[in-house]
């Protein structure tokens, strides 16, 4: 295993693994609540995991390109998972060391992506988010109703329920920032449970 057990060191290792990936704005970030997103050049927000959307895009010749089928019937691997299958082992290793009792099925990776206020409406239960990289600012902001909580997540895994609380990223950022969100999807859980029967 490449991780050391020291959280700050392991966050740097995970950042170095994720930073070179090809980032773009994934389909789950093209909805109305994300229409005002901001992303630095070369940044984006991608889902590492599974989707029920089989169609990917059109080929230059006009034919349809479909996603890679997953081990679960009726589900497909997202583009970034299909292109980088080895990354899953790093997510598993990191989470086993730093939040071993938290079960997750999907990972959202955001590079230099300043997310607007939104709910994670497709999530179930709590998520764990951690900020990676050499950056300042860009705290996670959570609307708790009577107050706005500002959380420094740099090298600090933080658990919260994004489907219950509206949240966003403070746009004041210096440096390069990757946030990684470990979570469970309602629709994915339903598909996985159906496949177990």
Image (cartoon, grey):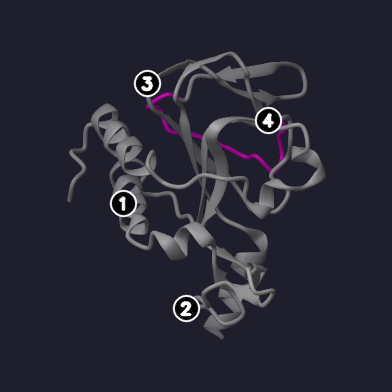
Lower sequence index among marks 4 and 3: 3
For disc 4, the marked residue is: 167
Q: CA distance from mark 2 to mark 3?
A: 36 Å
Q: CA distance from mark 3 to mark 1?
A: 20 Å
Residue sitting nearer the eye, 40 or 18: 40
Residue 197 in the image, given as x and y percentages of width and height? 56, 86
**Which callout, 3 or 1, points to the residue nearer the camera?**
3
Mark 1, other Cα within 10 Å: few <14 / some 14–19 / many ≥20: some
Query: Does the magenta segment cover residue 161?
Result: yes
For disc 1, the marked residue is: 90
Q: Main secondary structure of the magenta part?
A: loop
Mark 3, other Cα within 10 Å: few <14 / some 14–19 / many ≥20: few
Lower sequence index among marks 1 and 4: 1
Q: CA distance from mark 4 to mark 3?
A: 22 Å
Which residue is located at x 45 percent, y 55 percent? 103
Q: Secondary structure at mark 4?
A: strand
Lower sequence index among marks 3 and 1: 1
Mark 2, other Cα within 10 Å: few <14 / some 14–19 / many ≥20: few
In the displayed structure image, the side of residue 22 where residue 188 appears, left or right? right
For the record, the magenta segment spans 154-166
Mark 4, other Cα within 10 Å: few <14 / some 14–19 / many ≥20: many
**Which callout, 4 or 2, points to the residue nearer the camera?**
2
Residue 125 in the image, given as x and y percentages of width and height? 61, 49
Tag shown at residue 134? 3
For disc 2, the marked residue is: 71
Which residue is located at x 55 percent, y 19 percent? 138
Lower sequence index among marks 2 and 3: 2
**Which callout, 1 or 4, points to the residue nearer the camera?**
1
Which residue is located at x 46 percent, y 61 percent? 81
Q: CA distance from mark 2 to mark 1?
A: 19 Å
């Amino acid at each position: 295993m490449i991780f050391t057990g020291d959280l700050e060191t392991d966050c740097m290792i995970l950042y170095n693994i994720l930073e070179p990936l090809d980032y773009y704005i994934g389909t789950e970030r093209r909805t109305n609540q994300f229409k005002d997103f901001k992303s630095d050049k070369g940044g984006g927000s991608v889902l590492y995991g599974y989707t029920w959307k089989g169609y990917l895009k059109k080929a230059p010749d006009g034919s349809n390109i479909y996603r890679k089928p997953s081990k679960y019937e009726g589900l497909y691997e997202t583009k970034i998972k299909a292109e980088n299958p080895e990354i899953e082992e790093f997510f598993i290793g990191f989470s086993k060391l730093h939040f071993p009792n938290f079960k997750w099925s999907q990972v959202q990776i955001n590079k230099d992506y300043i997310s607007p206020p939104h709910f994670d409406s497709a999530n179930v239960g709590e998520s764990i988010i951690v900020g990676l990289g050499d950056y300042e600012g860009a705290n996670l902001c959570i609307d708790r109703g009577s107050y706005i909580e500002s959380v420094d997540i740099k090298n600090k895994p933080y658990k919260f329920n994004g489907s219950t609380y509206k949240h966003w990223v403070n746009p004041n950022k210096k440096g390069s920032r990757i946030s990684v969100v470990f979570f469970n999807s309602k629709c994915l859980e339903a598909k996985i449970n159906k496949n177990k029967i």
